[in-house]
Amino acid sequence: MQKITGLLVLLLLVLASNAFGKAILDSYIVRLETGKNENAVIEASMAAERATGGVIGHRYFTAIQGFSIYLPEGLASQALLRVPGVVDVEPNLKITTCSLDIPTGVRRINAHNSPIANIGSGQSVDVDIAIIDTGIDNHPDLNIAGGRNFTAGQPASYGDIDGHGTHVAGIAGAKYNSKTAMAGVAPGARLWALRVFGNIGPEPNLGDVIKAVDWVTKNADTIDVVNMSLSATGVHSSFHEAIKQSVAKGVVYVAAAGNSARDVYGPDGIFGTSDDTIPAAYSEVMTVSAMVDTDGNPGGRGASTSVGPDDTFASFSNYSNSVVADNPVNSTGKAIDLLVPGVFIYSTDKNSGYSTKSGTSMAAPHAAGLAALYIAANGKPDDAAGVYALRQALIDSGLAQASARGLADGGQSDPDEHPENIGYVTVGDLTYNGAVNFADFAVLASAWTTDEDDEGFLKICDLYPDSSIDIADVAVFADNWLTGLD
């Protein structure tokens, strides 16, 4: 109890210090009386150093008279007010550029702020994602761990035949590249190319996909997440059973809802009939629909497109009006777990290039990346129950379409009456309930003062990613306090 009380006091202090922006810990801007000459500014800054043991950053002589200073950890800034000539002391604030230096889809789901993704750090997300698709081309931004070709041809020839798989892979896990403005949701994740579309032999078929699922299941100790930006129409018990058995091994499957602007259960709205979109209709997979986002921000202020205005439901995307009684997760979207960006998505392509593509194929890997971030923070599921717990956490932590950061039209563009949540990273939401509050504070307190070598260390609490839970993490938590309560 004493530990929690002490941390609560610290949280309140940090909240107070951050009231007007995101402050840099122990760094302050000090303003002196107007009219001080350069010598007076230098003398005052030196007096501040002597009085506090701090370190001067800059001295200001013209626009204002004053200086910046870094104080020893824990020293109250009020000590600076006792220095002769000082009239104001303010926290130094963090700044960011205003350029769109990463893809809009990553920004729209707030993955660029995830401490687990830690975009720009050069670190890689320690998760393995299999891409069942057209293959993956060698690309400097992709961490390709291996793969296999399940079509006619050499098994080791898992290079991409048209760019679709490479594009999908980049959305899920491309490394951050500031020169090309590229980053995946889970940067640097190990990618496995499972090619099921060929350029020789028979046309693309479910038999090859089942073999890919079979390979994943055999390698379930390695593969954490599988992305399937593909679909077929019909009933297929063997395919369904293969996915069930793979999910039972703790593998998370993410599927594109499809691009036919219809129910994933088909026009009849009944699961298990010949018009089902599979695997999207299977309750064992995380099915994802697509929204329009053209600027990486909520509010509907981006450019409009032929498939809808900015921040609306994409007109081509499949949807869901009903769900089977034994669905293992509870989603407001019925058989759809999440809505994520899927229009004009920028990502990697063949020949070390880049391109924009649209479709639920592009939406699915955003969700696969979110699943990868969850696993990196909380560990790999052991079984189907763990997979469903992960899916429920991502559903619960998402944004309601009618929320302030949801769809610009409040969800009116969603063609059914069951608006699935938008996939979203809320920094500090340690309990995955969509808001940062005292429940999350309790989780942070449970790991307080631990580091990655301690038994009580929780990676999800490492909000300022340095492998320890300390005041820096409290500062990040305070920056996001009460986020999501809209």
Image (spheres, rainbow, N blue to C red):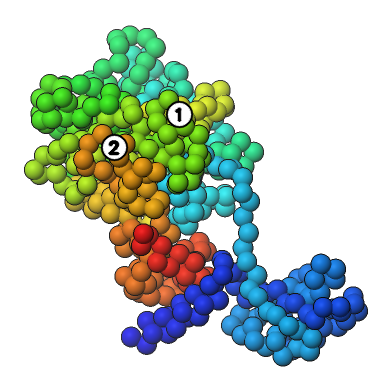
Instruction: In the rendered view, tell whether residue 125 sits above or below residue 172.
Output: below
Instruction: In the rendered view, tell whether residue 404 sits above or below residue 281.
Output: below
Mark 1, secondary structure of its residue:
loop
Instruction: In the rendered view, tell whether residue 229 sits above or below residue 471.
Output: above
Q: Nearer the viewer, residue 444 or 147?
A: 444
Q: To which quarter of the image does residue 319 belong?
A: top left
Quadrant of the image containing the N terminus: bottom left
Name the residue: 80% across, 71% down: 64
Q: To which quarter of the image does residue 341 belong?
A: top left
Crowd around label 2: few <14 · some 14–19 · many ≥20 (10 Å): many
Contact flag, marks 2 and 1 (Cβ < 8 Å): no
Left or right, 324 with respect to 394, comes to left
Label number found at residue 305: 1
Q: Nearer the viewer, residue 332 or 149?
A: 332
Q: To which quarter of the image does residue 169 belong?
A: top left
Instruction: In the rendered view, tell whether residue 390 sits above or below residue 14.
Output: above
Name the residue: 87% across, 79% down: 36
Q: Which residue is mark 2?
A: 414
Crowd around label 1: few <14 · some 14–19 · many ≥20 (10 Å): some
Left or right, 231 with respect to 109, comes to left
Q: Which of marks 1 and 2 precedes in the sequence?
A: 1
Query: Residue 62 in the image: x percent, y percent?
Result: 85, 68
Name the residue: 42% across, 75% down: 448
Q: Nearer the viewer, residue 472 or 299?
A: 299
